[in-house]
Amino acid sequence: MARNWNAKKTYVYGILFDSKAEADYYKLLLADPGVEKVEVQPVFEVIPSYQVTCYRCNGSGKQKSLKTGKAINCTRCSGKGSKTKPGAKYTADFKVYYKDGRTEIVDVKGGPASRDFPLRRKLLEKAIGQEVTVMEYSKGKWYRKR
């Protein structure tokens, strides 16, 4: 993905990761005896699709024809008066299932996080009701950031 700084796509066990840091962390998770299962790049809906009033017809579903001056179905909303907008999804790096029953959503950062990451993280945490763990690789060690 283009948003990763200096990230090199890396294959591990036939899975393509966005960065070497992600691939390395995946190997660590697989080696952990307390981990039961690792889901790679799980997708979460943070904002469901929603309806908005059509701005062209102000919700009436009709607009004035420029040629005849008569009311016709609005071409922007197809005469419905509203439009359905797509929601938003968040793709985490991992969903980790532990043998003791816990689950953890993990995002791996091998470099600086994008400017919008704190907001996207908060949206995900609100949507799933669980804290997102951010793992950062720096100076040869993994650090858990809160």
Image (tube, rainbow, N blue to C red):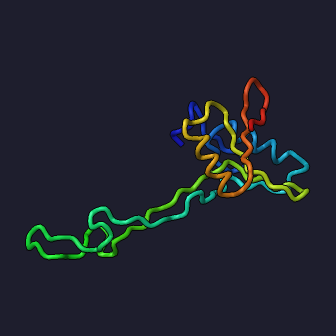
Quarter of the C terminus within the rendering? top right
| Rendered residue at 47%/62% (across/down) | 86
| Image height of 17 relative to 51, above or below | above
The part of the image, by quadrant, that contains residue 47 is bottom right
| Image height of 129 relative to 117, above or below | below
Q: Is residue 102 left or right of residue 137?
A: right
Q: Is residue 132 left or right of residue 82?
A: right
Closest to the observer, 108 or 28: 108
Closest to the observer, 119 or 100: 119
The picture places residue 145, in percent across and down from the top left corner, at 74, 36
Which residue in the rendered view is the most extreme toward the left?
68
The picture places residue 21, in percent across and down from the top left corner, at 69, 36
Quarter of the N terminus within the rendering? top right
| Rendered residue at 66%/44% (across/down) | 11
Closest to the observer, 63 or 145: 63
| Rendered residue at 91%/49% (across/down) | 33
| Rendered residue at 43%/67% (across/down) | 84
The part of the image, by quadrant, that contains residue 63 is bottom left
The part of the image, by quadrant, that contains residue 39 is bottom right
The picture places residue 8, in percent across and down from the top left corner, at 60, 35
